[in-house]
């Protein structure tokens, strides 16, 4: 089969005689091949580079693989218990995760490779009500879940006993979420909807309301923020006929437009200043070029697996990437010819990072070690190594740092980090409110103490910061107060002394696009203006102008290829082939600076000379530890050499940002003997120093809107230093009291620049010393300009793109592992990082495992889907709201462990029956009372006594009335196409037919009475035909839950014979006999009373096959079995989805010719409106279609729109 996109790029799919997908060939002739065994299970997947992953099965007909062997012969294995349930997963290093079950086959425990169990308690409906972690250990903690009568999650109680409460409307939609419910700090967010389930409003804590307006196609057209206030503002969105977003207009009427090719791929981005970025693609949909508005072109070449193999910059210099057979990044060769070579263990974890010179000489090697759960236990480097230990919740509890400093961490039961104690008597202690927000931080000497408290307002934002000179909070140093407008923007920051005297008060004004327009301090107002693209054009009396890609312009300014500034009228600049500044000079006989870098592009040294090539007059050198943190700074000012050594506060894993561990704050300074000389405490988020203790004195920091340190305070609350900065960070008055200054970053007085981790920043030029290590993934085509030239409201603490809103760093969120991303090893290139290249399958932190392989295929699918999401040289598009806000998180669900077949067949069938009886309100009309009785009589009590003939009765009714769009019997369209031809078992037919035949005949109430009648008759009939069998009577429907014991094949065979009145024979399948997708068949009797035949695939066990067969048949007709009865509402919407799909199919959009071409444009538009109306009316009157199904229908509609006749 060939699929051709709108640009005539063809994808070829091949199938075997059984209908299995055997190969996929992309438009570049790259082929992925898949092989299968006789049961239709995947046995191998081979990529275009001939790397093969193989799958082995040791459990008869199970659909999950028992062993997965990657191309490097690393084997991941699974084991199953005697009921076929997943019992253990072992990675290639034999680290095993095990699973325990209750007596009805539900997972109740997961034990990690370190032997730490997590247990799951459930209610009578199987819903998780309690999750207990680290059971039996000191770290044991519980999270509880409660449900409404309708089965929706109502309350989540965290380990500290605080509740999050969810409220719903009659349609089951979340209308409010209240965190810390019932406490004084509770925050509530509310959501409103229209009749089509679309979000129309959200109200944030504090009352800020946002409204959403849609067009008739359900596309977001207007986003209104600050609704009903004086600051109300609109952002509007426009789309093309196929639904692509084409224009976003901000509240100041500045528009950004987007262009697409015929395949729907983004090809142009035009900013409000008409600067165009152009993107190109190959036939497989890989993004191959990005051209900025100044004509700088970056090219990407891909290997046969659609991975970036070569990137060529605007100056023609290449960075190349090589991968091992398991798909992991193996070698990176930069534009200087230097290499980095990565080593991995059998579990795919990074174990070494070796740097080589352009001549192949090894320069440095870093190594990493892990425990069985994947926690990093060691990181070694010649300039600084680490050793770590963890508790049973995989949180670090001790860290041995470079220079002999050791840290120990403590946590509360919710996982907030409450203490950091060093081995020299210092400690930082933290407290948190019921929302998990930092409320107090104490810095305990030795020698002096400091305390800072944090209080929050009704909008959830920081309201007041209070400083104390003692831990008890009795000696006030001063306060900082914050003010906000109706859009929750900071409008005022006031720093006060202990008596309330104002030390510094700042007020801020904004335009409707959130750009700073004014700052007033001491009665003096500084005005700011910005261009339509948001770039700062005036800072008081200083003006800025820019070229098409954001480089400053002016007298003497020259910009070369790649946006490298070559001169600015005062200095000339030189770069190496990797785009790093290596020299700046005022002339051959004037001041000159030279710079050196390591393999990661980090600055390692700078030298100042009076003339170009002259003797050094000042130097500064830096080293970095194994985790990328700056370890030392050694400066010589021409007379005196000083060395600073840094210890880090460690493992703030919740801090966002690509540099991972390098986001740590420099918590302490250490002298040459390993003694801690200065300790600091930081607030929540990035670069927020609040206090410092050195020797017998303490000091505090007071910051402005962007985190710049404006005042250094002593214990008396007096300012010992003050500083004022320009918008880009030039000190215009005073100076910082220590190394923390502009934007909260570390200022280097010798260098005259600030250290922002990955790079250094020069406030005099508003530029970085090197390209962004993320490349175009930093979402700016100019890799040198600072925060898009918008410094009044943005910062870049990592040196690698402006950060997202930080979360509290004290909340530990998961085990710490190391890969090149975490170690700030983005390799300086967009779209490529080792963490994107998956190794062999492994269980995740929750122990989930799926060994079921899928047919091989390229990572980039048809129609231009790029293989890497990081190749984005444009701002992130605003995300319209989803059809509903994020639903509350369900309790953690352990893996099902059913191994692809149904171990507890009858138990599950009767669970379905219970939902039917207990939730009649969820149904929208099934058969009425009379239909229920007559159908039962026809199938069970009447002369037709076999499941196969009963199946025919129901099938006939479905074919007549609904055919392909019946909620259960939709798969009969597949039967018509020959995909499966089995007719099922009587048990299956009765259970699935009774509650869902001839929908809506005379109303839901009467229909469910009939259903109840049918279920009761079926229960009694089952008791008669299968007496004494555990689980045979539907206890789940009629009474308390009873255990179910799986039946062996012969028992089940005998039961079916008694139930149907027919004998059953069993035989192995003949070659080529089995139809696709079933793996087997049940052949009906030739005539009433004659034997039926069960055809078993070659190699399958009888008992396991019968279970798999039933599971497979039921899964074709019903959704996945959920522990929430709300699945019934979604189930009924399947009929609508299938009906719409059928109509679209008939119109010829699924690869077959139809009537579409014969319609006039008006008729075509009428058909589209009819489809939309059908969908929206159904959702208004019945219930929302599941998101995935709805998206499929909307895609179909958009394809029809794209096929409209020309006007």
Image (cartoon, rainbow, N blue to C red):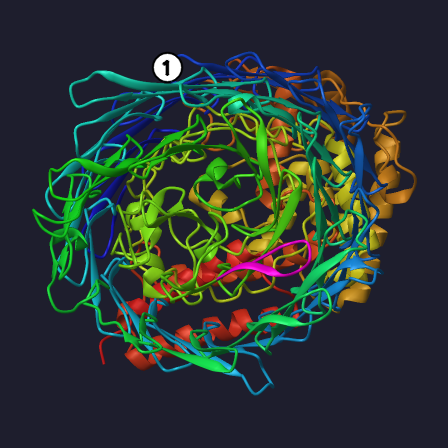
Image quarter hosting the N terminus:
top left
Q: Which residue is mark 1?
A: 72
Q: Position of residue 356 (x, y in %)?
A: 24, 21
Between 946 and 648, the residue placed more toward the observer is: 648
- Residue 637 shows in the view: yes
Inspect the magenta stretch and tell me whether residue 893 lies in it.
no
Residue 721 in magenta stretch: yes
Q: Residue at x 51, y 37 (%)?
A: 981
Residues in magenta, as a range: 712-722
| Residue 485: percent from left, percent from top | 59, 78
Compare residues 1112 and 431 and report the one nearer the observer.
Answer: 431
Q: Is residue 96 left or right of residue 1166?
A: right
Q: Residue at x 81, y 59 (%)?
A: 181
The front one of 1053 and 1144 is: 1144
Question: 271 above or below 384?
Answer: below
- Identify the image quadrant of residue 123: top right
Residue 440 image position (x, y, % from top left): 73, 51
Q: Please give left or right for residue 1151 compared with residue 1136 in the image.
A: left
Asked whether, in this view, residue 626 is left or right of residue 786, the answer is right
> Which quarter of the image is occupied by the C terminus?
bottom left
**Side (left or right) of 336 relative to 173:** left
Q: Secondary structure at mark 1?
A: loop
Label 1 crowd bin: few (<14), some (14–19), many (20+), radius 10 Å: some
């Amino acid at each position: 089969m060939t699929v051709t996109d709108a640009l005539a790029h063809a994808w070829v799919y091949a199938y075997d005689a059984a209908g299995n997908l055997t190969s996929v060939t992309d438009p570049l002739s790259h082929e992925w091949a898949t092989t299968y065994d006789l049961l239709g299970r995947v046995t191998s997947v081979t990529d275009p580079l001939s790397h093969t992953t193989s799958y082995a099965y040791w459990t008869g007909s199970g659909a999950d693989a028992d062993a997965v062997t990657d191309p490097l012969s690393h084997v991941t294995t699974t084991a199953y218990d005697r009921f076929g349930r997943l019992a253990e997963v072992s990675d290639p290093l034999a680290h095993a995760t095990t699973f325990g079950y209750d007596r009805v086959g539900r997972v109740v425990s997961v034990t990690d490779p370190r032997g730490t169990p997590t247990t799951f308690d459930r209610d009578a409906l199987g819903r998780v009500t309690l999750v207990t972690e680290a059971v039996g250990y000191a770290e044991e903690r519980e999270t509880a879940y409660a449900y409404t009568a309708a089965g929706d999650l109502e309350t989540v109680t965290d380990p500290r006993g605080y509740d999050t409460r969810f409220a719903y409307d009659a349609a089951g939609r979340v209308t409010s979420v209240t965190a810390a419910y019932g406490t004084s700090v509770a925050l509530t967010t509310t959501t409103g909807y229209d009749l089509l389930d679309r979000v129309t409003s959200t109200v944030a804590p504090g009352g800020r309301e946002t409204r959403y307006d849609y067009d008739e196609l359900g596309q977001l057209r207007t986003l209104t923020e600050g609704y009903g206030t004086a600051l109300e503002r609109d952002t509007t969105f426009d789309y093309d006929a196929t639904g692509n977003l084409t224009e976003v207009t901000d509240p100041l009427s500045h528009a950004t437009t987007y262009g697409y090719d015929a395949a729907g791929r983004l090809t142009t981005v035009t900013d409000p200043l008409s600067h165009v970025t152009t993107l190109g693609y190959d036939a497989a949909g890989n993004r191959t070029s990005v051209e900025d508005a100044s004509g700088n072109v970056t090219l990407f070449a891909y290997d046969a697996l659609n991975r970036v193999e070569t990137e060529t910059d605007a100056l023609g210099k290449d960075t190349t990437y090589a991968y091992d057979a398991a798909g992991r990044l193996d070698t990176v060769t930069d534009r200087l010819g230097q290499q980095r070579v990565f080593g991995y263990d059998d579990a795919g974890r990074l174990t070494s990072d070796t740097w080589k010179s352009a001549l192949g000489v090894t320069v440095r090697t870093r190594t990493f070690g892990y425990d069985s759960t994947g926690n990093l236990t060691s990181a070694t480097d010649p300039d600084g190594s680490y050793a770590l230990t963890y508790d049973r919740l995989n949180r670090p509890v001790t860290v041995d740092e470079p220079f002999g400093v050791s840290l120990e961490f403590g946590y509360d039961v919710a996982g907030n980090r409450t203490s950091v104690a060093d081995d020299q008597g210092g400690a930082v202690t933290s407290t948190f409110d019921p929302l998990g927000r930092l409320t107090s931080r104490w810095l305990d000497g030795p020698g002096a103490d400091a305390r800072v408290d944090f209080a929050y307002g009704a909008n959830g934002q920081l309201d007041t910061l209070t400083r104390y000179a003692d831990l008890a909070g009795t000696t006030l140093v001063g306060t900082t107060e914050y003010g906000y407008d109706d859009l929750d923007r900071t409008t005022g920051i006031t720093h006060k002394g202990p008596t309330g005297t104002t030390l510094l008060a700042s007020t801020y004004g904004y335009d409707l696009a959130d750009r700073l327009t004014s700052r007033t301090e001491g009665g003096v107002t500084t005005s700011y203006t910005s261009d339509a693209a948001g770039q700062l054009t005036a800072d008081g009396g200083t003006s800025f102008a820019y070229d098409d890609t954001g480089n400053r312009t002016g007298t003497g300014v020259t910009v070369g290829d790649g946006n490298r500034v070559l001169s600015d009228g005062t200095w000339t600049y030189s770069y190496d082939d990797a785009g790093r500044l290596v020299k700046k000079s005022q002339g051959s006989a004037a001041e000159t600076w030279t710079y050196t870098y390591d393999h990661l592009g980090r600055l390692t040294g700078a030298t100042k000379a009076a003339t170009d090539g002259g003797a050094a007059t000042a130097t500064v050198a830096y080293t970095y530890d194994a985790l990328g943190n700056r370890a030392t700074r050694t400066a010589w000012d021409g007379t005196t050499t000083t060395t600073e050594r840094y210890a880090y506060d460690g493992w703030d894993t919740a801090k966002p940002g690509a540099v991972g561990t390098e986001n740590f704050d420099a918590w302490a300074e250490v002298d040459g003997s390993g003694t801690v000389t200065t300790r600091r405490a930081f607030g929540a988020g990035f670069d927020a120093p609040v206090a410092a203790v050195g020797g017998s004195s303490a000091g505090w920091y007071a910051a402005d809107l962007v985190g710049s340190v404006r005042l250094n305070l002593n214990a008396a609350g007096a300012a010992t230093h003050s500083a004022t900065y320009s918008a880009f960070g030039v000190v215009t008055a005073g100076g910082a009291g220590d190394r923390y200054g502009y934007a909260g970053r570390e200022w280097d007085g010798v260098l005259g620049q600030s250290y922002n981790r990955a790079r250094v920043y020069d406030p005099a030029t508003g530029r970085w010393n090197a390209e962004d290590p993320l490349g175009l993934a930093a979402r700016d085509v100019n890799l040198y300009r600072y925060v898009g030239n918008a410094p009044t409201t943005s910062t870049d603490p990592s040196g690698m793109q402006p950060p997202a809103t930080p979360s509290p760093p004290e909340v530990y969120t998961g085990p710490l592992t190391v890969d090149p991303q975490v170690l700030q090893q983005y390799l300086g290139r967009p779209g490529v990082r080792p963490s994107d290249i998956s190794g062999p399958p492994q269980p995740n932190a929750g122990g989930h495992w799926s060994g079921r392989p899928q047919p091989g295929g390229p990572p980039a699918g048809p129609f231009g889907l790029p293989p890497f999401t990081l190749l984005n040289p444009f701002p992130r598009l605003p995300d319209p709201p989803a059809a509903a806000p994020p639903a509350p998180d369900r309790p953690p669900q352990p893996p099902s462990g059913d191994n692809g077949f149904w171990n507890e067949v009858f138990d599950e069938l009767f669970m379905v029956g219970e939902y039917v009886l207990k939730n009649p309100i969820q149904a929208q009309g099934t058969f009425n009372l009379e239909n229920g009785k007559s159908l039962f009589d026809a199938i069970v009590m009447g002369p037709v006594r076999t499941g196969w003939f009963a199946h025919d009765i129901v099938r006939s009714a479905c074919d007549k009335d609904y055919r392909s769009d019946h909620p259960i019997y939709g798969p009969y369209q597949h039967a018509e196409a020959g995909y499966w031809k089995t007719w099922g078992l009587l048990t299956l037919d009765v259970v699935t037919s009774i509650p869902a035949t001839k929908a809506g005949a005379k109303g839901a109430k009467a229909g469910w009475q009939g259903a109840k009648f049918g279920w009761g008759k079926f229960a009694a009939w089952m008791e008669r035909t299968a007496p004494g069998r555990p689980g045979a009577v539907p206890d789940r429907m009629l009474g308390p839950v009873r255990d179910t014991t799986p039946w062996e094949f012969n028992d089940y065979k005998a039961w079916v014979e008694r139930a149907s009145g027919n004998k059953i024979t069993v035989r192995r399948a003949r070659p080529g006999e089995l139809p696709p997708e079933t793996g087997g068949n049940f052949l009906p009797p030739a005539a009433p009373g004659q034997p039926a035949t069960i055809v078993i695939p070659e190699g399958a066990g009888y008992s396991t096959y019968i279970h798999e067969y039933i599971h497979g048949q039921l899964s074709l007709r019903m959704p996945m079995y959920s522990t929430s009865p709300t699945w019934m509402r979604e189930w009924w919407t399947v009929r609508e989805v299938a009906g719409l799909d059928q109509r679209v199919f008939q119109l010829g959009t699924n690869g077959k010719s139809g009537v579409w071409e014969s319609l006039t444009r008006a008729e075509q538009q009428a058909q589209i409106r009819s489809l939309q109306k059908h969908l929206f009316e159904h959702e208004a009157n019945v219930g929302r279609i599941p998101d995935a199904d709805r998206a499929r229908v909307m895609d179909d509609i958009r394809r029809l729109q794209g096929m409209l006749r020309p006007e």
